Amino acid sequence: MEPTVIQDLGEFYGNHLFIKREDLIPYSFGGNKARKGILFFQDVDKGNYDSVVTYGSSHSNHCRVIANLAAERGIDSVIIGPEEVSDQTFNSQMMKLFGSKIITVPVNRVHDAIEEKLTELKNNGKNPYFIPGGGHGNIGTEAYVQCYEEIRKQGLFDYIFFASGTGTTHAGLVCGKLINNGPEQIVGISIARKNPKGRQVVLDSIREYMEDDVRANDATIFIDDYIGAGYGKENTEIKQTIIEVLVRYGIPLDATYTAKAFNGMQTYIQKQGIKGMKILFIHTGGTPLFFDNMKVL
Ligand SMILES: *Cc1c(COP(=O)(O)O)cnc(C)c1O
């Protein structure tokens, strides 16, 4: 993959702000799910698979990218999702366009439904490849180790901020830092999970990838102060951030991930009295969600 651009956004509360445009990865509206999905499909392409199974809601950027990657190859994609979040979005419309088979079940049945579907496909002589929700797991972590190394070739920053959801992006960046003895502070802004569990999930992903618990513990900064009303819930402040960033820089953010993280970063920098630093914000994508948000903006 070609490196994604790092743009200079200039002065930011006494610091110098840069943004890495992962949203401009040139595949299926980009984003961190594209970087992870492309790597998962390198694995799919090595085997004799005729279908992929994954899970996520109708809002899922991950499911849209996986559906696109499968459709491109002419193999089936099955998406298991929670009934509770199954309203129509631009992502869900694209999944349908890609011909995904979408199965919705109550959220507490998702795990069993995945197992049942995989068994059913195998019993029917199919060879399915399972991709964890959000592109979680070592392949997803590896995608962000690669991203970390890409950043280091582009420049050195004092801080790296981004939205932390399943924690895979976070884990990959921290592993990249540990492997390369990076000096920067890697700060994940949680969009839903609380401490200590949210941070533990990141640490578990790091441990699955590499064994370096002591350094991993020191290097994992998981901030849960900016979750607001919870996953996917926007508020006036988040809406304001979306409008401000769009007006000032011409960059779209979404309410679930990137605007929450940008807003969290902004407050964190002021609260911590951070000044004179080079700060990188990773734009992790979610452009279709930006358009879903238009009706509430
Ligand atoms: C999934 C997602 C995230 C969170 O990434 P994780 O690796 O799951 O922590 C952040 N931003 C966007 C736009 C996403 O779709």
Image: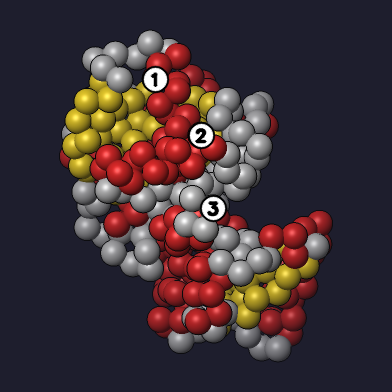
- Of labels 1 and 3, the one closer to you: 3
Residue tagged by mark 3? Answer: 296
| 40 relative to 143, above or below | below
Where residue 291 sits, quadrant-wise, is: bottom left
| 10 relative to 169, above or below | above
Q: Which residue occupies 40% across, 26% down?
A: 266
Asked whether the viewer can see residue 202, the reply is: no
Q: Check disc 2 and give the amino acid type.
A: Glu
| 224 relative to 34, above or below | above
Q: Is residue 239 left or right of residue 270?
A: right
Q: Which residue occupies 72% across, 62% down?
A: 82
Numbered mark located on residue 245 in the image: none
Q: Are marks 1 and 2 in contact (CB under 8 Å)?
A: no
Task: Locate the N terminus and report the quarter of the image it occupies.
Answer: bottom left
Q: Which residue occupies 30% across, 44% down?
A: 247
Find out if the beta carbon at label 2 lies less than 8 Å from the nearest ligand 1 atom.
no
CA distance separating discs 1 and 2: 16 Å
Residue tagged by mark 1? Answer: 269
Q: Are marks 3 and 2 in contact (CB under 8 Å)?
A: no
Residue tagged by mark 2? Answer: 237
Is residue 138 or residue 201 the one in the foreground? 201
Is disc 3 surrounded by few (<14), some (14 to 19) or many (20+) residues within 10 Å? few
Element on which disc 2 rests: helix
Where residue 150 sits, quadrant-wise, is: top left
CA distance separating discs 1 and 3: 28 Å
